[in-house]
Image (tube, rainbow, N blue to C red):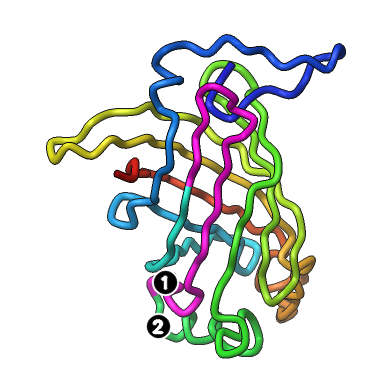
Amino acid sequence: MGLFGRKDDDKGATGSAVSPDLAALTGDYELDPAHTTIGFVARHAMVTNVKGHFKEFSGQLHLDGADPSRSTASIDVVMDTIDTGNADRDGHLRSADFFKIDEFPTMTFRSTQAEALGGDDYRITGDLTILGTTKPITIDLEFNGAAKDPFGNERVGFEGKAEIQRSEWGLTWNAALETGGMLVSDKIKLVFDISAIRKA
């Protein structure tokens, strides 16, 4: 039994045994922006990958070691802080062609279901809202462990990844290439490297 719980078995029962180390992690946590990355990867011109991330966001985790199925996650991302390392490209992404940040300043994720896959691997399902459109996504997570840092903060860490089709959220801008294909891939890879601190 892991942090986020395991799907019920055929009898509808959920395991109740929780190892002491996981039980000790029960509590509310807040994402640490200085040590957390929320990023993405898009295929550009069909030949290379463009990587980016968001500089500002907030997030909350609730971990329940006694009943891991009750664990939850929520993230709010400030879209104006998108950063791909190119000012012109970032400006285009903020514009009406893409994220329309004046109208939709925030992207959100709210978990709805979770299961343990064995070992440190988990799968989290939740609602992702972009441009006012909400659709489910699935994030594969790896639990990296827990530790107390030199400043006395109790931390937990996760790495995660997911894939989405951006057109499903109304992100349809593109340009045709002379050699065939499109400038920007519809498939976008989402990447997460999370460090969260237990609240006092």
Q: Secondary structure at mark 2?
A: helix
Q: Image quadrant for the C terminus?
A: top left
Which residue is disc 1 drawn over? Answer: 83
Q: Amino acid at mark 2?
A: Ala
Residue at 72% x, 17% y is 14
Q: Is residue 136 left or right of residue 142?
A: right
Mark 1, secondary structure of its residue: strand
Badge number at residue 10:
none
Does the image show residue 115?
A: yes
Q: Is residue 179 visible?
A: no
Q: Quadrant of residue 115?
A: top right
Q: Residues within 10 Å of mark 2 (few under 14, many from 20)?
A: few
Give the spatial CA distance, label 2 vs label 1.
8 Å
* Residue drawn at the location 43% of the way across and 70% of the way down: 84
In the image, residue 150 lies at what x, y percent?
Answer: 13, 36
Span of residues in magenta: 61-85
Residue at screen point 61% across, 37% down: 140
The residue sitting at 23% across, 39% down in the picture is 153
Residue 89 rendering spot, x and y as whole percentages: 49, 81
